[in-house]
Image: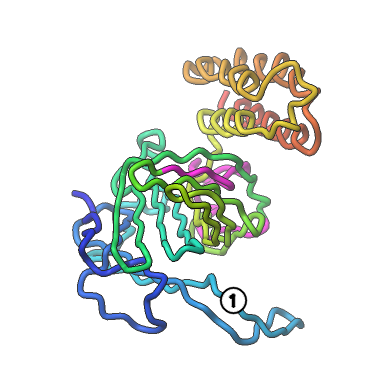
């Protein structure tokens, strides 16, 4: 079974011009789900807001224009197939509001039981200023950076998940990313405005505001959005991906003094993957500690310390599994 894909002729589900307050769209046109089932819909709209915010002993007036209201319809409980401890699926959701009136929603669904394979429903929904909706499941997401969970907020099921071996104290999550949708002409980079925006939920859950810049067709665009993540990276086969991506997308100034390019450093790290796949953890550990760590010496700070931390975390996880 799969979620219904948006109908391009239906009313907008991500409409920058949608009215504040309840809406009565008969056919919400964006779908996403944790356990794929028909007739699952998500309908949301950006909202402006103003008022007062009180946090502890601090209170101040606030105003903004990048809030959102999210409504979801499910024929059955959406987490029914997620596992007793919410361990089967993870997701990445990003909502994007551009300054030219376009709205986009990226949803990626990961099946953890099949080595994080991307499964339905996954895709990009877009709505133009007139409310016309487009959809594409042909897109490219390049993870430009990851962050390590600082373990400041413990999810409700965290201790149980660790006890049964489906969670680790070391966990990385998506952070900045590059999104391309050729059929729509969208090419944007999303960067976080808040570091490690954790929320106390049953499972690991991070969601925070983002800054967006790029192009739509031949037009330069910018905007804001949010980035929601429940997909952790902690197993050795996942951490090697975090390490490779973190090297591959190093900025030019970070490798200015290195004899190896960012691509060559990423390839050097990736040479440990065959050993990891074959559970030859000693061989993988030597590749990372003896060769890669030495290659990181010329990398400028703070990138070098960040990369060494990822290497150390991966080696620790290898030791746990070996």
Which quarter of the picture shows residue 153?
A: bottom right
Q: Residue at x 51, y 48 (%)?
A: 188
User: Which residue in the structure is indicated by mark 1?
Assistant: 64
In this rendering, position of residue 250 left or right of residue 112: right
Q: Which quarter of the figure has residue 300?
A: top right
- Is residue 162 shown in magenta? yes
In the rendering, at what x and y percent does residue 20 appear?
41, 82
What is the x, y in percent for residue 224? 55, 62
Image vertical order of residue 205 relative to residue 56, above or below: above
Q: In this view, does 182 lie to the left or right of 285?
A: left
Residue occupying image coordinates x 51% and y 63%: 99
Q: Nearer the viewer, residue 116 or 299?
A: 299
Q: Relative to 304, is 32 above or below? A: below
Q: In which quarter of the image is the C terminus?
A: top right
- Quarter of the image for residue 137 reads top left
| Residue range of the region highlighted in magenta in the rendering | 152-180
């Amino acid at each position: 079974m799969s979620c219904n894909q948006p109908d391009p002729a239906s009313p907008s589900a991500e409409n920058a011009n949608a009215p504040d307050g309840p809406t009565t769209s008969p056919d919400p046109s964006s779908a996403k789900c944790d356990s794929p089932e028909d007739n699952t819909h998500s309908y949301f709209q950006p909202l402006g807001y103003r008022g007062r915010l009180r946090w502890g002993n601090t209170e101040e007036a606030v105003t903004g224009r990048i809030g959102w209201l999210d409504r979801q319809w499910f024929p059955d409980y959406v987490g029914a197939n997620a596992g007793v401890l919410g361990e089967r699926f993870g997701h990445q959701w990003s909502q994007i509001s551009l300054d030219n009136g376009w709205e986009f929603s990226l949803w990626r669904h990961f099946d953890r039981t099949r080595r994080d394979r991307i499964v339905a429903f996954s895709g990009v929904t877009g709505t133009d200023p007139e409310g016309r909706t487009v959809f594409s499941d042909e897109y490219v997401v390049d993870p430009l950076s990851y962050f390590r969970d600082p373990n400041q907020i413990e999810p409700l099921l965290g201790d149980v998940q660790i006890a049964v071996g489906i969670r680790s104290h070391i966990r990385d999550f998506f952070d900045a990313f590059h999104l391309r949708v050729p059929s729509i002409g969208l090419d944007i980079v999303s960067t976080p405005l808040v570091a490690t925006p954790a929320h106390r939920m049953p499972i690991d859950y991070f969601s925070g505001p983002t800054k967006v810049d790029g192009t739509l067709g031949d037009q330069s665009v910018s905007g804001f959005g949010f980035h929601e993540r429940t997909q952790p990276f902690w197993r050795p086969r996942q951490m090697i991906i975090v390490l490779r991506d973190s090297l591959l997308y190093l900025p030019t100034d970070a490798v200015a003094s290195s004899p190896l390019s960012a691509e060559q450093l990423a390839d050097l790290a990736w040479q440990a993957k065959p050993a990891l796949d074959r559970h030859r953890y000693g061989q993988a550990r030597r590749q990372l500690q003896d060769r890669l760590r030495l290659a990181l010496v010329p990398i400028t700070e703070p990138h070098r310390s960040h990369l060494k931390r990822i290497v150390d975390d991966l080696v620790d996880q290898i030791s746990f599994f070996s």
